[in-house]
Image (tube, rainbow, N blue to C red):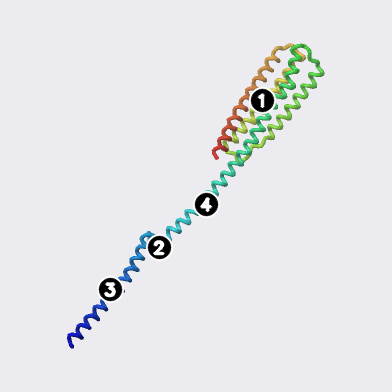
Amino acid sequence: MRQILLSIFVLFLIGCNQNEKFSKAEDLSAVAKTHFTASNLVITTSEDTANNLSNSTANTGDHDTENILKNNISDAEQSNSAALETLLVQINETHDDIFDVWDNNFIPLYNAYQFDGLEVEYAADEITNLNESYVKLEKEVENLSVPDDLPAGEQLRIQEIKDDLLLAISNRSLAVIEFKSMLGSDDVLHQAFMDIHIANSNRYLDEVKEVNAELGVRNEELITAK
């Protein structure tokens, strides 16, 4: 009888040990599962993760701010390019107008003078028209507005162009004065001075054309690069 009771007690202890093992096994499984999840999804500790998220948000904000600044700069540069393009077109038109007035009004006068077919009254009227045309062109050049937001270097180049245009007009006007003096005098110096003024005017106009084209190419490259 004692042996039977002892056997039953031993079996009871074995059963308790097995239940305890199963219980511990379940706990370890849960821990193992949590550890697996943590090792695969949450690489850093929770505090580090929070810091990383915070830094990531900050970096995103900085990136957005940088994009806004870039867009604003791009818009400003685009505006400058458009303003410069308009100004260069005006300069080119004034440059051509100086030649057109000369070709249409002065050349016929000079040709008539060369062939002794120039009437004094007609010449006086045409010379007055020439002078008025160049005074008008001179005001157009003086009224050319240089945008304040253009780079300093471009502003300087535009001002140089304006100065050259004014000098070209001035030399054309001086040439007309010499031509007028030729009508009442046989002094060959008037012809010589007239030729010098015309040559000077052409030189200034060539410089205008060159610098204007240079600025146009640079502006086109800037637009293309955007």
Q: Nearer the viewer, mark 1 or mark 4?
A: 4
Q: Position of residue 196 (x, y in %)?
A: 66, 18
> What residue is shown with label 1?
168
Q: Are marks 1 and 4 in contact (CB under 8 Å)?
A: no
Residue 88, image quadrant? top right
Q: Position of residue 58 (x, y in %)?
A: 48, 56
> What residue is shown with label 3?
21
Looking at the rendered structure, the secondary structure element under dot 2 is helix
| Residue positioned 67% across, 17% down in the render | 195
> What residue is shown with label 4?
64
Question: Could you tell me how far apart the alpha carbons at marks 4 and 2 are, in whole angstroms?
Answer: 26 Å
Residue at the outermost right position: 121
Q: Position of residue 14 (x, y in %)?
A: 24, 78
> What residue is shown with label 2?
47
Note whether 10 is above or below 95 in the view shown: below
State which tag comes first along the sequence, 1 or 4: 4
State which tag comes first along the sequence, 1 or 2: 2
